[in-house]
Amino acid sequence: MKKIIKASRSAYSVDDMYSMLIEYGIATEDEVNLVTDIAGYSEEIMEDILYVREGTRDFNDLRGEY
């Protein structure tokens, strides 16, 4: 049986995404920490936070906006 490895969808690391959410004012550090404490610390969760606040899951979309 082959093991399926999920490839990274983003050019950014989870730590980069975390920082961008806070630095760009998309969410406060407390908000991001609360969500990650409940749901986990992953690319998918960072994208979920971005989607709820900005309507996109692609961190590349933020490059020209902030």
Image (cartoon, helix red, strand yellow):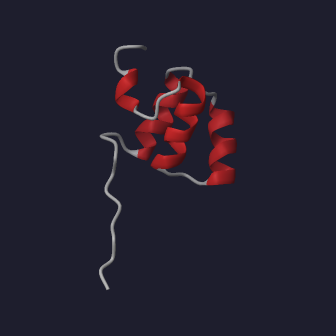
User: Residue at (65%, 42%) from the top-left corner?
Assistant: 33
User: Residue at (41%, 13%) from the top-left corner?
Assistant: 65
Query: Please, is residue 58 above or below residue 66 in the view?
Result: below
| Residue 24 falls left or right of residue 52 | left
Query: Please, is residue 64 above or below residue 33 in the view?
Result: above
Query: Please, is residue 25 above or below residue 49 in the view?
Result: above
**In the image, residue 14 lies at what x, y percent?**
44, 45
Quadrant in which the N terminus is drawn: bottom left
Q: Residue furthest bottom?
A: 1
| Residue 26 falls left or right of residue 33 | left
Q: Residue furthest top?
A: 65
**In the image, residue 29 lies at what x, y percent?**
62, 33
User: Residue at (50%, 51%) from the top-left corner?
Assistant: 42
Q: How many marks?
A: 0
**In the image, residue 61 lies at what x, y percent?**
37, 24
User: Residue at (40%, 33%) from the top-left corner?
Assistant: 58
Quadrant in which the C terminus is drawn: top left
**In the image, residue 31 lies at what x, y percent?**
68, 35
Query: Please, is residue 37 above or below residue 29 in the view?
Result: below
> Residue 2 versus residue 13: which sits nearer the camera?
2
Tell me which corner region of the image, top left, top right, bottom left or bottom right, holds residue 13: top left
